[in-house]
Amino acid sequence: MTGTPQRKYRSDYQASIYLIDRVSLDFDIRDGSTRVTARHSVRRNPQLIGTGGRWWLDGRDLRLVSIAVDDEPVADGALEVSETGLWLNGLPDRFTLTVVTEIDPDRNLSLEGLYRSDDMLCTQCEATGFSRITYFPDRPDVMSRYTTRVEADAERYPVLLSNGNCIESGAAGEGRHYAVYEDPFAKPCYLFALVAGDLGVIRDTFTTTSGREVALALYTEHGNEDQCHHAMASLKDAMAWDEATYGLEYDLDSFVIVAVGSFNMGAMENKSLNIFNTACIFAHQDTATDSDFARVRDVVAHEYFHNYTGNRVTCRDWFQLSLKEGLTVYREHQFAIDHGSPGVTRIEQVRMIRDVQFPEDAGPRAHPVRPESYVEMNNFYTITVYEKGAELIRMMAQMAGREAFTKAVKHYLDKHDGQAVTIEDFVLAIEESTGLDLAQFRHWYAFAGTPRLRVSSRFADGRLSLELAQATPATPGQENKPNFDIPVSVALFDDAGQVVRAPEIVRLIEQRETFVFDGLAAEPTVSVLRGLTAPVRLEFDQPDDALVRLMAHDSDPVSRWDAAQSLYMATLKAAVTAHQNDEPMPALGEGMMTAVAALLADPPDDRALLAEMLTVPSATQIGEAFDAIDVAAVEAARRYVKREIAARFEAELERLADAHAPSGGYVFDQVAAGRRRVFATALDYLACLDTPAIRKRAQAVYDAADNMTDRMAALNALQDLPGEEREATRADFAERFADQPLVMDKWLRLQAATEDGDTAARVRDLLADDRFDFTNPNRVRALVGGFVRGNPLGFHRADRAGYALVADEILRLDAINPQLAAALAGLLAPWRRYAEPYAGGMREALARVGEADLSDNTREIVDAGLGDQAGP
């Protein structure tokens, strides 16, 4: 706890007074403590004139054993030590700094720095975890070449790993051993990594285009090796794709991944030694769903792609986080599209933006892709920085064309190799290479909020006039917004669904502009914002018959899906209003029913796309259509529409389920995964009817399943159908997978999302269960996060027990893992988006949290939610 949080501002950036050319680290790992000896070759920054002599080094939860300059102990008067670091005074222009610290990984529950995860020691240094290892300028613009020596008990820690190439290893006496690693590439300290443990391993090799053989290794706790082969195959696919697409060849002799059970993030791209949450590595048909397989594939690719876009070229400061993350997420998106169903993969990306990023942009912590200030950097690993940042890259790529943009990225990497740079440096490199004028486009990085794109059309005398207008709501700290540069993809179709104007991108620069399309024989159907060419809210009132045509004929899968979503939304919004006014539910829209009937009668070849188009909008999307979210009304409307569709098309859905029922052995590929997805969708609809036949069918699917995807489809269908089938399958599931933590996370989510009974009490019982590990982020996210996101009625219950539960867990977690506590606080912070009585209950719980002595992480989120700060 640090008292009043100190806000950092981008405008205050100053380069480091001193630079460190080489870092030599020695880790002496013992029971109860680890001694770290760090020797640094330091010189005054030549770009700064008239400075030097005084230097700040970050450090937290460290015991300082000794500190010396050129091997002479630092005098007391030249040293000032605080809880967050130390000042050194009277320093020369060049010197060797030696710092000896002691740390206790076993007691470090923050999961930052060096800590224990089960039987291994591992590190997590991004963003500022290195300051929990030794005193150091913990900032990304201090780039050094590292040599690391690790010594430990040979029996307890037979595997010793760090960044770079292993140049020496051997016995160290008394049953101990050591290994020395040298990383030839300069890197910031946030990319440092170390692992020590008794681990199993799978190995492979990859031959680069130049003929070099790279040794690949994936380490995990013994017994989990069979769950790692998909991750290894994904790594090789990513390496080959990056060579083929960007011409980027891996630059070291080895690449190592370690799977860790306790990890705050999904994974970390440390140079040559990537550390992953097991949830992003383990994938076996018995324990992982198709979605899990896809996630592993994409996260492995993401972290590998960071080798260039993040490691070889890194951020000058943490305000530039999207420089590496936005670009690498975009590259991950490209890879995923090339390795799955292209249309559905893009739909999933669009859904992420709409379901998670748009609400963040409308909430109390709305912030630009490049924030202007922060209290705790870990709070800015957000969907805005990552996913919206990727959408900005995608916009530039669309405006330039993929080939020209790829060349521009190469220009950027060549120009800034080995440097710590800014987002402005990246945008400038794109302009230099492509010739694009991105002056106005830069507003996307500087301003928060989701622009609203209003579209209207007028047709006369063979001419279509398409008027586009933009407006962006105020966000905390940014009342007035400039005009954005918005690329909009447009295509025109005739009544038979034939293209009459091929897709093209127009750029909306002004607040309002009209684009004219001449030489048309009849009024066309307009397809606009195809593929979500910009992260904006589209407001375009189109008649049902036009939407039905787009669903059936649009060549862009996202536009087909969007048309279906629009048809569903019209009925859903009417149903929400009816519930609020205590009126009968409306009849289902004729356009929607026509569209569903057409889908079932003549489904698209891509079965995953069929599943998406049959899926009604999420509760989040429905709620976002209203000024204030009425949870009960949204849930009632969504259930009503699903049940009515199921009743109207019961026979067709049964035939659909029969045609896509499990058959043959499990294979993870686009066709097989699409089939399973359609089957699960049909089963979910039929479960809305709650018939004895569907209960028995779901249990039969569970009993016969040879893979987790089908097993979960059955469990989800039985989710809200209390009875012997549900209890039998859940009991079997818990017993069968009791020794599989990631599978038990699925069981926890099922328990938390089940709406019958007192869910809040059930979640509290599970939190107190001896089998629940409160220090493991995966467990907490599964149970508490599963409760909030998967059980809206249980979380938003009238007695406010759901809010109280989450507030209690925030307070309990904040003392040991502030990152996780802050993430939970973010679930209460957007209370203003809700109708009463939900808003009052959420605010009350958040205010109770705010009365406590909190970490900077959690305090920043709570204060923003309560409105005590103007916003980042």
Image (cartoon, rainbow, N blue to C red):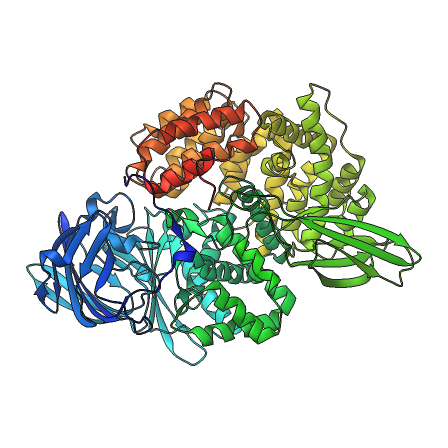
Front in this rendered view, residue 632 or 368:
368
Looking at the picture, tell me which residue is in the foreground, 292 or 775.
775
> Of residues 490 and 761, which is closer to you in this image?
490
**Residue for point 68% across, 54% down:** 557
Work out whether 557 lies above or below 748. Answer: below
Could you say which quadrant of the image residue 577 lies in?
top right
Tell me if 324 is positioned left or right of 20 in this view.
right
Residue 693 image-quadrant placement? top right
Q: In the displayed structure, does residue 491 sit left or right of residue 664?
A: right
Q: In this view, does 56 lie above or below 813?
A: below
Q: Quadrant of the N terminus?
A: top left
> Is residue 645 visible to us here?
no
Q: Would you say 757 lies left or right of 200 here? A: right
Q: Which residue lies furthest to the right in this view?
A: 461
- Outermost bottom residue: 210
Q: Residue reaching furthest left? A: 174
Closest to the observer, 164 or 748: 164
Q: Where is residue 442 in the image (x, y as percent from the top left)?
A: 57, 61
Counting from the top left corner in percent of width and height, residue 17 is at 28, 66
